[in-house]
């Protein structure tokens, strides 16, 4: 049966849109990949308890954890309490601690489940950091908490360090001090200022080559403690340059939500693993594509994952830091939560036309898992927007 609904366009017009997509079938068993694939997962707010969503947003823990089971069942590792979970944009360190603790406990109930947890300095306001020692203590607090709970850390970029550092040597000092004392290997995190404007000039320079030299020296000096590095600059040439110069045994994790398909496939010599927010939104497609890649079926890998790229580019368009709204919008359309509200009211960060474009592209990418439900919810959403 053909399903059609009217959708607004950027020029103010309305077009009847006819759905053409086909949902991706779920695997009969948890698939195996030949790439390490972390899905950075979102959190689900609880609108019935959300009295002060800007200050202390309420989290629906049951639904939040159920979504992690969805990702584990599709073969993904989870990158927990990361940017996708609205760290620093609705979820503070207190909320992140609870999320980390609960997710680690939940992972132990699932055979083969794996996750790593974001640890940064976000409980330290950048303006309150007076010295590098303040930044070091903040990192020690968060990585110490992750390790106390039995988890492994992803060492998130620090707004406080970006503000107070005066040279690349300051980054070498802080990272070296922390990495020498971590219990396990960690994943470093190079997040561009398109994701967080406060991270401008991270690693001590706006020049990519200079910044690259700094982070490579940090990795080389601490190679026994670094599993890999996630790079999120939305520039595939920058990622390839990093990937080609990494020390043997140190992994490159793509965080490029614009170019992930080609970076994961690789150039015949090297490839990237993945730590991506878009995998939250397109998990069944990404799972099928990665499973196909593992069997050498490149054609299926490309045919399944490439249609998700235009959708991802729309979700992550500038201002990129608001991409979380599109991720949660799709979770709602696909029935993973009962509402489209977010911590800090972040659903208001994008406009109706943006969401209409996401709906079209999700259908064309075969990402709408339950088209009838998605149409029903899209119609209700349009009504609430005055359409």
Image (cartoon, rainbow, N blue to C red):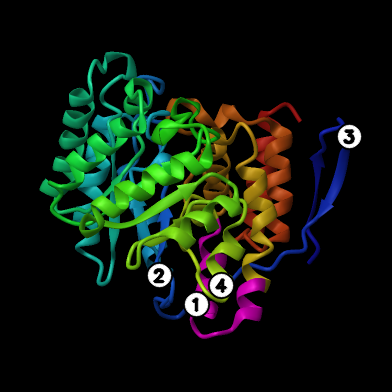
Which percent across, then down, holds residue 95? 28, 33
Closer-to-camera residue (299/352): 299
Disc 3/disc 4 C-alpha distance (Å)? 36 Å
Answer yes or no: is residue 102 visible.
Answer: yes
Disc 3/disc 2 C-alpha distance (Å)? 41 Å
Mark 3 or mark 2: which comes first in sequence?
A: 3
Is the residue marked by circle 3 packed among few (<14), some (14-19), or many (20+) residues within 10 Å? few
Mark 2 or mark 4: which comes first in sequence?
A: 2
Circle 4/circle 1 CB separation < 8 Å: yes
Q: Quadrant of the C terminus?
A: top right
Q: Quadrant of the N terminus?
A: bottom right
Residue at disc 3, secondary structure? loop
Disc 3/disc 1 C-alpha distance (Å)? 41 Å
Q: Label 1 belongs to which residue?
A: 291
Write down the region rendered in magenta.
282-302
Is the residue marked by circle 4 packed among few (<14), some (14-19), or many (20+) residues within 10 Å? many
């Amino acid at each position: 049966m053909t399903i059609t609904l009217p959708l607004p366009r950027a020029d103010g017009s309305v077009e009847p849109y006819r759905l053409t997509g086909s949902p991706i079938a779920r695997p009969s068993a948890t698939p195996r990949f030949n790439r390490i694939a972390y899905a950075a997962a979102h959190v689900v707010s609880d609108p019935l308890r959300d009295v002060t969503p800007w200050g202390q947003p309420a989290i629906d823990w049951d639904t939040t954890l159920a979504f992690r089971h969805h990702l584990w069942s599709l073969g993904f590792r989870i990158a927990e309490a990361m940017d996708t979970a609205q760290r620093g944009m609705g979820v503070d360190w207190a909320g992140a601690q609870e999320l980390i603790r609960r997710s680690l406990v939940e992972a132990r109930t699932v055979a083969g489940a794996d996750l790593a947890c974001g640890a940064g300095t976000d409980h330290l306001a950048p303006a309150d950091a007076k010295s590098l020692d303040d930044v070091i203590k903040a990192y020690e607090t968060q990585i110490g908490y992750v390790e106390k709970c039995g988890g492994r850390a992803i060492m998130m970029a620090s707004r406080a360090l970006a503000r107070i550092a005066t040279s690349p040597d300051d980054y070498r000092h802080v990272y070296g001090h922390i990495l020498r004392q971590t219990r396990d290997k960690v994943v470093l995190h190079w997040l561009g200022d398109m994701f967080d404007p406060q991270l401008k000039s991270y690693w001590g320079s706006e020049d990519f080559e200079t910044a690259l030299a700094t982070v490579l020296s940090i990795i080389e000096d601490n190679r026994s403690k670094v599993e890999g590095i996630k790079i999120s600059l939305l520039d595939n040439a920058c990622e390839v340059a990093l990937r080609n110069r990494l020390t043997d045994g140190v992994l490159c994790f793509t965080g490029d939500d614009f170019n992930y398909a080609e970076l994961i496939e690789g150039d015949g010599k090297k490839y990237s693993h993945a730590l991506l927010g878009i995998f939250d939104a397109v998990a069944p497609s990404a799972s099928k594509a990665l499973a196909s890649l593992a069997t050498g079926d490149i054609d299926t890998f490309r045919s399944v994952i490439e249609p998700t790229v235009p959708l991802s580019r729309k979700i992550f368009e500038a201002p990129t830091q608001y991409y979380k709204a599109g991720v949660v919008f799709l979770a709602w359309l696909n029935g993973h939560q009962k509402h489209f509200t977010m911590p800090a009211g972040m659903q208001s960060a994008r406009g109706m036309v943006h969401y209409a474009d996401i709906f079209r592209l999700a259908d064309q990418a075969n990402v709408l898992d339950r088209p009838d439900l998605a149409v029903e919810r899209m119609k209700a959403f349009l009504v609430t927007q005055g359409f």
